Image (cartoon, rainbow, N blue to C red):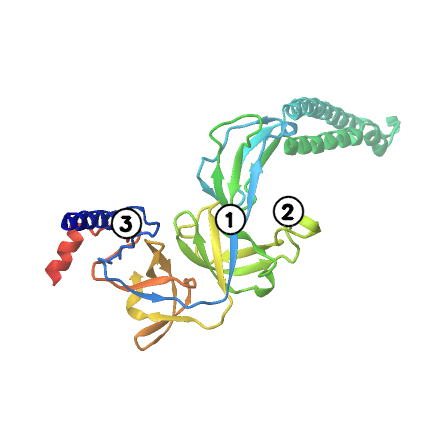
Amino acid sequence: MKKKLGTAIGIVVGIVVIGIISQKIFFSSEPVVEEFEDPYEIDYFTVPSMEQVFVNGTVKPEQSQEFSKEEAYGVMGDLQVKNGETVEKGTVFYTYENTEVATQLSDTTNQVARMETQRSNAIYKRDLAIKNWNKLPEEERTQTLEEVKMDMSTDDLDAEITELYNNLASLKEQQYKSIVAPFKGKVYVPEVKDAESPILKLISDEFYVSGTVNEKDVGKLTKEQTADIKVISNDYTVTGKVDFIDLNPTEDGAEEGEYGQPSTMSSYPVKLSLDTLEGIRNGYHVQAVVNIGKEAVTIPTKAILHEGDAVHYVLVNDFGTVVRRIVQLGDEEGENTAISSGLEAEDQIIVSSKIPVEEGQLLDETPTSEAMDSVNVEE
């Protein structure tokens, strides 16, 4: 009997123990951590921390102008340029004709013709009178030759005709009004035409970055500082320089928060020039990074890749995606090279990897069989 009781107690204790263990396994609030094995075996170089100023902005054209219809100029003629066409300064876009002036021009032209006929007749009569005066014997002449010429003078008629010709010249200038390109640029003709849309828009081929910097950092910027300008939509990066710093905050400025204290810092307008327009479009949103520190970052030379002789870049692990950073090279020091611009603090630069990686690749995905096979073949 005691043996059976002991056996029963043992079974119950076993069940309880198993239940506790099961509860810990299935209901434990502590997550199960699985170690991630990097199949690429990437060797990284981390860019050290550096003092940086960030400028958020938009790419804008140096010059831009819209052209709308001007009723006062008269009837508009056909467009002489096409959408997307690049034109030089002075190129004619279209021409107006002032119909009222055209009517005045026609009337004045007819008036001039009539006056010219009158003058021709007057000159004929004068010449005939002088001829007849010359035929008369001296004793029969009642006037001197000068008196005859004065009586038959066309001076007043000549003055009227001269004035009419001046009016004609002025009217001809007013008849047509040509609208020309004030600067070199590209023509954009809107596809949808309504009362509000312009006839066309001219945008210069030169662009800059119009951005803002907060009040904490505006004092750190100086003109000609190098800036790394990254297009937010595609991570494309170019270099530029600080061109202008406005000491007056933007109109929206800092809003008032609780207790009359500002809830945000003021923003100050900044203009950045671009060293190249390759890969840059009007309207792109960008973020520029200005390194305040004077010392260049030194990275392993073998991490630097080249595209021709002019473009140098590195591959960076940007939160699991391989992105390209175009860099400006400095002096080479042994196995390292100084980078004057193009990098951000804490960038994870890919120095080498067992399996080749490329721009746009997601590092949390399993490598393709082709990539694995290429590694196996090399080994």
Residue drawn where x is 49% and y is 70% of the image: 293
Q: How crowded is mark 2: few (under 14 residues within 10 Å), some or many (20 or more)?
A: few
Task: State the SS at label 3.
Answer: helix
Drawn side of residue 37 relative to residue 71, left or right? left
Q: Which amino acid type corresponds to the residue marked 3 in the rendered image? A: Ile
Q: Identify the image quadrant of residue 42.
A: bottom left
Foreground residue among 164 and 86: 86
Foreground residue among 349 and 94: 349
Quadrant of the image containing the C terminus: bottom left
Residue drawn where x is 51% and y is 48% of the image: 58
84 vs 127: above or below: below
Q: Position of residue 240 (x, y in %)?
A: 48, 59
**Residue 105 visible somewhere in the drawing:** yes
The numbered dot on residue 252 is: 2
**In front: label 1 or label 2:** 2
Q: How crowded is mark 3: few (under 14 residues within 10 Å), some or many (20 or more)?
A: few
155 vs 332: above or below: above
Tell me the distance, in whole angstroms, between the alpha carbons under discs 3 and 2: 62 Å
- Mark 2 and mark 1 in contact (Cβ < 8 Å)? no
Nearer the N terminus, badge 3 or badge 2? 3
Task: State the SS at label 2.
Answer: loop
Judging by the rendered image, the residue that carries numbered circle 3 is 20
